[in-house]
Image (spheres, rainbow, N blue to C red):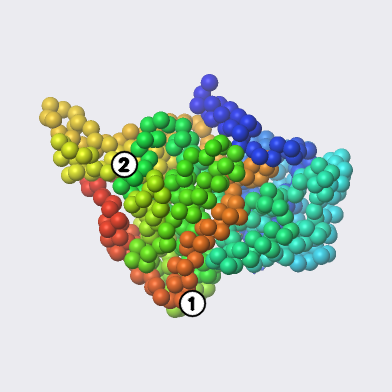
Amino acid sequence: MDSGEWCVEKRGSFRNESFRDNDNVPETGCLSIIVLGASGDLAKKKTFPALFNLYRQGFLQSNEVHIFGYARSKISNNDLKERISGYLSQGKENAEEVSDFLQLIEYISGGYDSEEGFQTLDKAIYEHEISRNSTEGSARRLFYLALPPSVYPPVCRMIKSYCMNKSDLGGWTRIVVEKPFGKDLASSEELSAQIGELFDEPQIYRIDHYLGKELVQNLLVLRFANRFFLPLWNRDNIANVQIVFREDFGTDGRGGYFDEYGIIRDIIQNHLLQVFCLVAMEKPISLKPEHIRDEKVKVLQSVVPIKDEEVILGQYEGYRDDPTVPDNSNTPTFATMVLRIHNERWEGVPFILKAGKALNSRKAEIRVQFKDVPGDIFKCKKRGRNEFVIRLQPSEAMYMKLMVKQPGLEMSTAQSELDLSYRQRYQGVTIPEAYERLILDTIRGDQQHFVRRDELKVAWEIFTPLLHRIDDGELKPIPYKAGSRGPVEADDLLRKAGYVQTHGYIWIPPTL
Ligand code: NDP
Ligand code: BG6
């Protein structure tokens, strides 16, 4: 059996036996997927392509599934299909599959608070269900809100009033919502309360696409299925942890949205904090979604307030040239900050979260730096420390920087690595897109990789005081050149937090 088959089989057995909480709801039969905001950027670039990939792989069957696009834009079915087909097609190679997939899509135009619009939508869904021999209320309805959060409350009210499956007849209705879920603790809680009045928590899937990335999903296995990490993963051995997100492009036409949110709300409070939870949390008592999410909440509750002197903000030069960004914008496009955890495992270990746009490279990684070897007889300090690096993207990999004897007659030491580069190790295995995996989870009723309401609340509690100080102009971003490493002050903070950079060693992803 090759490694590809192994992966698929293992993943399947994980999910069916241990990951799912909702074993009493039907996961087969007629399925309607409704993409609200179908005319938008996310729908075009991520949602429809993910649905297409699921279709190609046989996870969506044309005799069961119908996809509805809904938005205000007065466009035709064909307009929508044309808009998205460029993101699906790989030339002639898959033209037939693309065309078959597009047949499953129907566009309906209507407002986000329009009773008439949602009644029309409900009628169309119902007709599809009847055509598949389902009785009313017995089918599955998945609503994907690819919309700005400002319209979540009216949309949820309309779904509840006009498009709701009667779950007592055996079907289900699930709602997928995108980040940013609120702008601070108060607004997020208000949004949660509004949606919570309409839907039960098991029906709500708060998506954070970082939780769908291959190496993020691997963190639990790595940490808790490997004996040799268990004794090392603590304050006795680890000097510091960095969780880094870098992009080599700016706000790229999304300046208006970005300026309202900034890098902390866009990346750190959600994507990096989710990764932080999986790196720092204690072992859950089982793989059930609620047990995992309980542990995430606990570690978040142990984070102490962020100190101003442990935050560096930046804004790239040229950011304000975007006509949708105010000339006096104080919004950070870069931030480095230290999170500290007050618990037995992590007391004294800085977790450095860093994210920036318009930097000199694109990558996301976790870097765990170990302490120096005590009683060192090899002068290792001069060469650098052991590090365990998990490269989330691009070129997924895990590598361990370690000291070895330099091959040859001399007894000298050198930094080298144990390298698990995915492209090389798992040749021929396609790593699924995060959205693909997460949409499949919503269809299967697996909430493990989604953010629970109390988790979201603590996440906002951590960042809200800092965000308010930035919004009030008390903390100012330092200008940095687009295409640079960001403000040099961020590297100073890193050093102060105890990170020791290795000079003269660079890991180069192996080529095939
Ligand atoms: P868009 O700005 O493209 O909006 C999606 C659709 O919503 C639009 O086509 C428009 O449809 C409708 N819309 C836009 N503004 C408003 C408004 N003020 N009031 C009512 N309807 C409006 O957003 P994206 O597709 O980029 O993002 C959707 C959601 O996903 C957001 O919450 C975003 O933060 C999140 N997200 C986006 C990512 C991306 O890469 N784009 C990545 C991660 C998350 P119409 O006018 O036809 O009704
Ligand atoms: C989104 C942010 O959530 O994540 C974007 O809104 C960012 O600003 C994107 O570019 C990055 O996602 P990925 O998967 O490309 O790292």
- Look at the image and tell me in which quarter the C terminus lies: top left
Furthest-left residue in this view = 410
**Circle number at residue 326:** 1
Q: Is residue 267 above or below residue 427?
A: below
Give percent across and percent down for residue 60: 70, 39
Mark 2 nearby-residue class (10 Å; few <14, some 14–19, many ≥20): some
Give percent across and percent down for residue 313: 38, 66
Depth check: 95 or 160 in front?
160
Classify residue 131 as left or right of residue 296: right
The answer to which quarter of the image holds residue 122 is bottom right
Q: Which residue is mark 2?
A: 237
Q: Earlier in the sequence, mark 2 or mark 1?
A: 2
Depth check: 173 or 260 in front?
173
The mark closer to the camera, 2 or 1, is 2
* SS type, badge 1: loop
Contact, mark 2 vs mark 1 (Cβ under 8 Å): no
Kind of residue indicated by mark 2: Asn
Give the residue at x 60% y 42%. Answer: 289
Number of marks drawn = 2
Depth check: 375 or 511 in front?
375
Furthest-top residue in this view = 1
Classify residue 377 as left or right of residue 389: left
Kind of residue indicated by mark 1: Pro
